[in-house]
Image: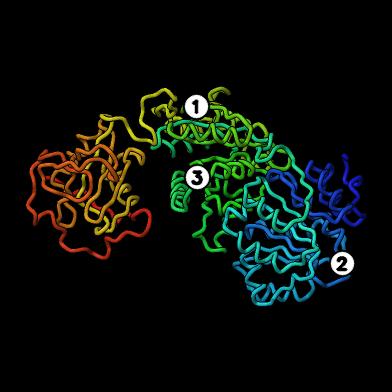
Amino acid sequence: MSTFQQLGLNEDLLNGISDLGFETPSEIQQKAIPVLLEEERDLVALAQTGTGKTAAFGFPMLQKIDINSRTTQGLILSPTRELCLQITNELKLYGKYCKGINVVAIYGGASVTDQAKQIKKGAQIVVATPGRMKDMISRNLVDISKIQYSVLDEADEMLNMGFYEDITDILGHTPTDKSTWLFSATMPKEVASIAKEFMYNPIEITVGNKNESTSNVSHEYYMVNGRDRYLALKRLADANPDIFSVIFCRTKRDTQKIAEKLIEDGYSAGALHGDLSQNQRDLVMKSFRNKQIQMLVATDVAARGIDVDDITHVINYQLPDEIETYTHRSGRTGRAGKTGVSMVIVAKSEVRKIKSIERIIKRQFEKKDIPSGMEICEVQLMSLAKKIHNTEVNHEIDKYLDSINELFEDTEKDELIKKFFSVEFTRFFNYYKNSKDLSVSESSSSNDGGERSSGTDTRYFINVGRKDGYDWMSLKDFLKEVLELGRDDVFKVDVKDSFSFFNTEKANEEKVLAFFTDFKYNGRFVNVEVSENKGRSGGGRRDRGRGGKRKGNDRPRGEKRSRRSNDSNKPEGRRSDRSPKKGRRSASDRPRRSRRK
């Protein structure tokens, strides 16, 4: 079947489809809609995100319910508020010409009373998140005892989010003779369990193979040292000037940190994670959909329900803990028939995960090198040239042409072009002209996970810590500023209660030690010494330096410089204005180097 008319949809729905500009049904729509219209059957449909699943169950439900009845006849469960609202809006658009249709969204973060009032007015279809739906059932604010159709959309994601008990409890309040339609991208055992418990002899429809990635997405991986991960992310963004992407991190903390660093470095970025309020989430998503944000940094849970068709890239800053989750990540791009790219930044130790993902998604990854600085300069230059070439002339500029021509009357055409493009080109050239190669070969001898091989870096002890108001980020910012080093030249910052550790390249050792000789802050010596333990402070043997015992696994390396007395090493009392806010310190909070005579 090649048209919606051939699927058996009524005139009202076809008019709505025509207004939306839909012409050809997707594969999942071609397979599911005729079956659901013709039979009262349970259905399990497996298809990737972005293949048109909402229409596949939305059109049949809209056509089969009784619009003249105010009884709730259809229930759709979805994993997130964003997806819940999206499904609701799409159903309203599909049913634009179905007079009397009322579709209500039920979700957390909004007034329960207002949602209950909307249902009381007569909602034939309720679209809900499991948590809020269960809450409203327990309060007797919604009646689903007479529904005829239930849909579990993104079933695997709901179960991954821990909604199994909520779903089973909700379905326990529904009639046993209803039709249940389960739509999922993958088929883990929990989804199979739901199907077995609440469905009778379901028809199974699979678009592609189970767990297989869509063919519209190409998969690439880039191998770097662990500490170069952020630099690699920036280069991938710079090498794709028109990027519109979702960047996935494993934790809320990493998500916020990476987003803040990108913003600090001049990128249009935003963070989406569970610690944001609902209002903050809405503002971030609105900015992303309007493309005011080009790089959305998100956790897996927060990103569920993001349905934006124009995403060009998915960047896996860190691989997910569950390999199956990669399928959902990559499904955020290559939607609605468009192509997309899923990139993975990995350390050497993670390459084996790539092989495991390949087996699951049945797609091969292409190993690529991180673009060099000069390659990025060329890409940016040509991108600017194309934008200028395609720019429509604003004739309001005509009145200024005489003055402009007079200014450049002695400038040759080639020289003028060089000057014009140098404005943008020079910015990238100055940044990347001395940049290093970030790519790592699988046969290289560098340690996994970003650990430098012995002898390439130096680890230091410093006698300030959490009690002095520092966390790892504010201490790193302080060291970066006073030592005049780049952000990524200070690494492995490990903050304890009363002392800390950090690393720099071995080439910076003399500079670091010289700077902190007789360095005072508020009358207190800030003491920096070389630690003998080259590993991370979480493991390894306990080395004893001649400076006596200290907590932790790192020890200062002997008496490299003169010791101060115990009294001179103690702080003179903690001042309230030295307690930094979370994140970066303001300039006034940072210790300043005292002048030497």
Q: What element carries label 2?
A: loop
Task: Work out whether residue 402 can be spotted.
Answer: no
Q: Dot 3 surroundings within 10 Å: few (below 14), some, or many (20 or more)? A: few
Identify the residue shown where x is 60% and y is 62%: 165
Q: Is mark 3 on a helix, strand or loop?
A: loop
Label whose residue precedes the other's in the sequence (3 or 2): 2
Instruction: Give percent across and percent down for residue 195.
Output: 70, 53
Label whose residue precedes the other's in the sequence (2 or 1): 2
Task: Tell me if label 2 and label 1 are in contact, CB under 8 Å.
Answer: no
Label whose residue precedes the other's in the sequence (3 or 1): 3
Reading the image, the residue beneath label 2 is 67
Instruction: Give percent across and percent down for residue 146.
Output: 79, 70
Q: In this rendering, which labeled residue sits more in front, label 3 or label 1?
A: 3
Amino acid bearing label 1: Asp
Amino acid bearing label 3: Asp
Q: Could you tell me which quadrant the N terminus lies in?
A: top right
Reading the image, the residue beneath label 1 is 369
Q: In this rendering, which labeled residue sits more in front, label 2 or label 1?
A: 2
Reading the image, the residue beneath label 3 is 321
Q: Dot 2 surroundings within 10 Å: few (below 14), some, or many (20 or more)? A: some
Amino acid bearing label 2: Ile
